[in-house]
Amino acid sequence: MGLVLTTLTGNYAVSYAVKLSRVKVVSAYPITPQTTIVEKIAQLIEDGEMDAEMIRVESEHSALAAAYGAASAGVRAFTATSSHGLLYMHEMLWWVAGSRIPLVMAVATRTIGPPWNIWTDHSDLMDQRDTGWLIAMAENNQEVLDETIKMFKITEDPRVYLPGIVGLDAFILTHTSEPVDIPTQEVVDQFLPDRRQPYVFKAGDPLIMGNIPKDLELNMRMREDIDKAMERAKKVIDEVDFEWGKLTGRRYGGLTECYRCEDAKHFIIGMGAWVGDMREAVDKLRSKYGVKVGLIKIRYVRPFPREDLIKWLSNASSAVVFDRSFSPGSGGHLFLETVAHASVAGVRTPIKNCLAGIAGVDVTYEDIVDVVLKSISEVEEVGTFKEFIEWYYRGGR
Amino acid sequence: MVLTIKDLPKDKYVMPGNAACPGCPENLGLKFVGMALGEKAILTIPAGCTSVIQGLLPGSGLKFPIINVPFASSDAVAAGVSVAKKLIGEDAVVIAWAGDGGTADIGFATLSGAAERNDNIIHICVDNEAYMNTGIQRSSQTPLGAWTTTTWKGKKERKKDLPMIMLMHKIPYVATASVAYPLDFIEKLRKAASIKGFKYIHLHAPCPVGWRFDPMKTVSVAKLAVETGMWILFEAINGKVVISPPSKPYVDKTKRKPIKEYLSIQGRFRNITEEILKDLERQVDENWETLLKFT
Ligand SMILES: Cc1ncc(C[n+]2csc(CCOP(=O)(O)OP(=O)(O)O)c2C)c(N)n1
Ligand code: SF4
């Protein structure tokens, strides 16, 4: 059976994934560049192609609140947002995760103002790391579609019962068309069971969620269990990836994917759409410069792929973490977490942080080649880095 | 048919010994909601006194299904629940039960949004005219002249007319109620539950702690609010206002008790000037005049 590919933007890939996942309630508020996800879903519903209800709310806070209400009452729900919209609903993200209600959200990752800027970086997504949501980031539109469908299964697994985000870079994915295989409804139905969730609110059943705790230790244990669920999710993510691979032929790896890592001495670490450029950079660095470079693609920020990173980095000569978001006064988000876990595990590999592509600045594979070549030669000369965090601008500072 | 106490179910939805203060009007209101709609109700409750009244997790002093929710989200969560129940085909009356802050201030955009969409829920604003849960700070529902912990010399602005604002949303049902008139409130709740779309009920709820009066007097204070004409009971189906029986006599201005009777039993108005008193009196007349235009 030949594969029939359809040309889809990243946003439409989300819309079709939501339809195929038989989502029952969609509630959202428009923000560039998320808009076409919801516009498409509205059209699918109005044309009778999708059997769901749309709640056209007045804000993102309410978008997540309404999706949460629907999910708490027993149906599969979805929302999507970006940038300021995501920050506006931040309080609700904590509430949904704390309630252990499975729910899926697409985040079109976008710069945060001021100034108003619609281009991609990862500040909005990374600002949600502490909320208790699973957070995945896609490299291309096929992965956007696949990961969205998979996220429903992962979040509704009783070992997890947490909400989940699928991130896709503003415009680079959201508005760029790529050939995508849309699985049939039969395949998705075979893959995705009926909705499961820890509890459902029903009239006549006096269940209460969220009143004041008598025992603070119980409250602390509830928080701890979110952490444990994240740990358990690692296995679930692997299993689901395997299952999806069996049905579609597409396996991505679990929390990370490693590209040309087997014999690699130097590593590039990154996530999102520019991983495509990093692959090219790896090929170039190997073919043209003869350096043994591998790429660790971060697929999940939460749970964080601690074990994978430690495994690959422990025998490496150097690594560069590319971050599209950072914490002012500290460093790049992926970098900070990578070095924290690596150093606790006793990894002595010099790891450098390259802050690039922030505020939507374009980065090409040549830029990446540049940065990596320089960092390798520095490590080879001095054995370490003079500066561990570098702001990269093409043509120098 | 007139509702009497005998017609009400015996089931209790508010357990004795919960965490409400003595004389708590919110506790009273919840009892009446139980009597009216107990077995059908699902409540969303934002931050406020009722978060505390419920008692402590993992137990609870209320027998409703309750989703506690962030302060500004009660109507949106309720809208989601209501849509889900419709899709599942389950019978439920979804109620957003919020204080005046959770309704008129931080929750206002959410309220207005749900009303404009005509989401199939009942919003009950339990109005104790201040942020009681955080320690009696002023809200947009605090009346002119009232002492609060953020208006030590008395609030300088008048109470925002929320029932009127909701009437202007052209929703199918708007009503006011008072904890002193349970049968009127219960009837309104049942009527609201029988109507599809967005229903708004504004429940006047005198709070002994915040208003500084004897906890034995919650009902008397609430009654005086109606008898002085300071609080008007009405309902409006599709925008047509009908003054409710307890307030009917006070359409006639001469039948209204002097508002001083209402103000003087509350510590929060202890220091108001003659000028503010006059202003409050003028507001009562004005509110009646405005409302009667819609009858
Ligand atoms: C976003 C947010 N801001 C502030 C608070 C703190 N807070 C909790 S309850 C409350 C006041 C509640 O007042 P109201 O809605 O009138 O209800 P009441 O306590 O009087 O019943 C405030 C300010 C909060 N929980 N969430
Ligand atoms: S402060 Fe007032 S409204 Fe709040 S619980 Fe006490 S009596 Fe009830």
Image (cartoon, coloured by chain):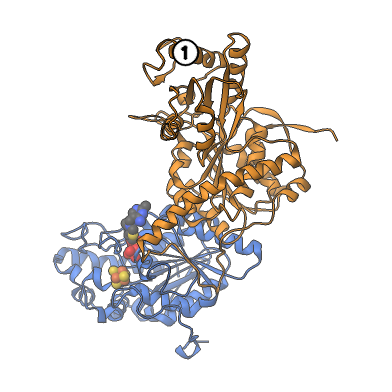
Chain colours: A orange, B blue
How busy is the neighbourhood of tag 1: few (under 14 within 10 Å), some, or many (20 plus)?
Answer: some
Q: Secondary structure at mark 1?
A: loop
When the figure is inspected, residue A36 is found, relative to residue A205, above or below; the finding is above
When the figure is inspected, residue B3 is found, relative to residue A122, above or below; the finding is below
Q: Quadrant of residue B194?
A: bottom right
Ligand 2 falls in which quarter? bottom left
Q: How many marks?
A: 1
Disc 1: which chain? A
Q: Is residue A147 visible?
A: yes
Q: Nearer the viewer, residue B240 or A268?
A: A268
Picture residue at 46% right of the left edge, 15% below the top: A375
Q: Is residue B115 visible?
A: no
Q: Quadrant of residue A248?
A: top right
Give the quarter of the figure containing the C terminus of chain B. Answer: bottom left
| A169 with respect to B246 (left or right) | right
Q: Position of residue A362 (x, y in %)?
A: 52, 19
Q: Position of residue A126 (x, y in %)?
A: 46, 36
Q: Residue furthest bottom?
A: B6
For the residue with label 1, is its CB less than 8 Å from the closest atom of ligand 1? no
When the figure is inspected, residue A375 is found, relative to residue A172, above or below; the finding is above
**Amino acid marked by disc 1:** Arg
Q: Position of residue B29 (x, y in %)?
A: 39, 75
When the figure is inspected, residue A191 is found, relative to residue B27, above or below; the finding is above
| B36 with respect to B263 (left or right) | right
Residue linked to disc 1: A394
Q: Residue furthest right?
A: A1
Q: Position of residue A309 (x, y in %)?
A: 52, 32
